[in-house]
Amino acid sequence: MGDVLRTARRRAAGAPDRRRRRPPLPAGPTHLADLVAHGRFLRAARDAGQWARLRRISPVPLLRDAFARDVAALAASGAGATAPWLTPGTACHRDPVDRNAAAALTDSLRAAARRAQADTELAASAAGVELHNPYHDAAVLDAVLAARSWERVSSTRYKPLLVDAFGDLLPARHRARTTKGTFETSFHTGVRARLPHLLDHCDGQLAALGLIRPERLRAALHRAALGARTPWRALLAVYGAEIWLRAVGNAPAPTWTVLTPARRTP
């Protein structure tokens, strides 16, 4: 509640929100498991400490998951991964513990590619805009996956693999970047504008199935409308599932036509 009130006071006073910058580690530190597996314990301890400092959490759970090679738990420690509105009995799929960072990255790439494909189709059909995503080129992804996991991330440098690969081909101002905007302002604005509509979805299909606690989801929406820190990844996922369930329930029943083969005349 204190976080919400402080944010509301800043917004009312017209003060800028200084939390709109993304630290160099946007995803969970799955590379820690690989560092431990290769015996790089000092590097694992250092990276866990730096990552925890950025996220303002304890490094102990990160190291515990790294030594257990629980890549799924490390991936879930990224920003926006928590979903406090899920009911205790909601089943969550967990990957096998012995997976590595490359497998987790491949899963995230598949999810990103599906979203990019959907964006491309929407842009082409709705606005006539042809989108391209060179970061999803097969050769680029093969090169990224060929690098060791701890070479792909850094707690002090932004996109180190990209900077090292392109060198002087990348403009100096891009090489010197240490962070990136999260574009959260548009999300907060959208929630405020459509808050009654979004609140109506809290008591929908997911709540009827006992998968979410509507009161906690409503509280998260009110926090987002005030501009407080929001787990957007989890929030978008729950609304995507709710909208999909509603679309399936409202879709007309399929009709089937039996075709009788024509008789052949002798």
Image (spheres, rainbow, N blue to C red):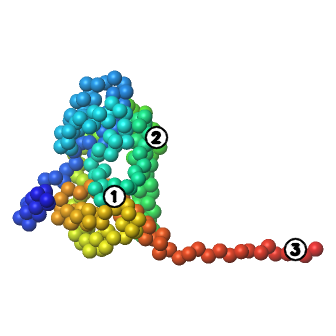
Q: Residues within 10 Å of mark 3 (few under 14, many from 20)?
A: few
Separation of residues labelled 1 and 3 (CA atoms): 62 Å
- On the image, which quarter does residue 198 sit in? bottom left
Q: Which residue bears the numbered disc 1?
A: 87
Amino acid type, label 2:
Ala
Q: Which residue bears the numbered disc 3?
A: 264
Answer yes or no: do the residues labelled 1 and 3 have beta carbons within 8 Å?
A: no
**Foreground label between 1 and 3:** 1
Q: Residues within 10 Å of mark 2 (few under 14, many from 20)?
A: few
The answer to whether residue 129 shows anywhere in this view is: no
Given residues 156 and 221, the one toward you in this image is 221
Amino acid type, label 1:
Thr
Q: Where is residue 129 in the image (x, y as percent from the top left)?
A: 41, 64
- On the image, which quarter does residue 261 sit in? bottom right
The answer to whether residue 3 shows anywhere in this view is: yes
* Quadrant the C terminus occupies: bottom right
Given residues 155 and 78, the one toward you in this image is 78
**What residue is shown at x 74% (from left), y 74% (from top)?**
259
Separation of residues labelled 3 and 2 (CA atoms): 55 Å
**What residue is shown at x 27% (from left), y 37% (from top)?**
62
State the SS at label 3. loop
Of the two numbered discs 1 and 2 on the same chain, state the one appearing first in sequence.
Answer: 1
Does 116 appear above or below 32? below
**What residue is shown at x 26% (from left), y 42% (from top)?**
25
Of the two numbered discs 1 and 3 on the same chain, state the one appearing first in sequence.
Answer: 1
Q: Which residue bears the numbered disc 2?
A: 139
**Foreground label between 3 and 2:** 3
